[in-house]
Image: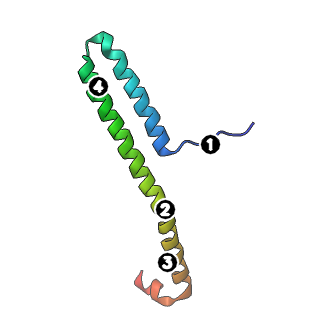
Amino acid sequence: MPVPPTPTPAETFASILWCLAQAVVTRTAFGLSQPLINLIITRIRDAKQAFARLAARIQAAEPARQKIRLAAAAGARGSGVWRAAR
């Protein structure tokens, strides 16, 4: 049986926030008002979207960072200048 793919950090965070939102919604029976619930859900949604944007920015920058690391590694092997600078 194939192993399911590991969820990304953004997906994991989104599922945690979904569970948190569901917990808040169930609190209506315990005295939270609808406007307060809406405010909390809006804050949770904003946090989810901000984390997704941050994760996308990090993921987009990863190839550039890897390219820099490869260039630095090639420079370390090819010249004594890199070794002397360390």
**In the drawing, does residue 19 fall left or right of residue 44?**
right
Kindly identify which residue carries mark 4. Answer: 38
Disc 4 residue type (three-letter): Asn
Kindly identify which residue carries mark 3. Answer: 72
Q: Earlier in the sequence, mark 1 or mark 2?
A: 1
Q: Earlier in the sequence, mark 3 or mark 4?
A: 4
Between the C-alphas of marks 1 and 4, the distance is: 33 Å
Residue depth check, mark 1 versus mark 4: number of the one nearer the observer:
4
Circle 2 sits in a helix, a strand or a loop, which is it?
helix
What scheme was used to colour the molecule? Answer: rainbow
Disc 1 residue type (three-letter): Pro
In the image, residue 16 above or below residue 65: above
Q: Residue at x 65, y 39 (%)?
A: 4
**In the drawing, does residue 72 fall left or right of residue 47?**
right
Between the C-alphas of marks 1 and 2, the distance is: 20 Å
Disc 2 residue type (three-letter): Glu
How packed mark 2 is, by other alpha carbons closer than 10 Å (few <14, some 14-19, many 20 or more), is few
Circle 4 sits in a helix, a strand or a loop, which is it?
helix
Kindly identify which residue carries mark 1. Answer: 5
Q: Position of residue 29 (x, y in %)?
A: 32, 10
Which numbered disc covers residue 62?
Answer: 2
- Which quadrant would residue 18 be assigned to in this image? top left
Residue depth check, mark 3 versus mark 2: number of the one nearer the observer:
2
Q: Residue at x 52, y 77 (%)?
A: 71
Between the C-alphas of marks 2 and 4, the distance is: 36 Å
Seen from the viewer's position, the closer of residues 85 and 75 is 75
Seen from the viewer's position, the closer of residues 49 and 66 is 49
Q: Earlier in the sequence, mark 1 or mark 4?
A: 1
Residue depth check, mark 2 versus mark 4: number of the one nearer the observer:
4
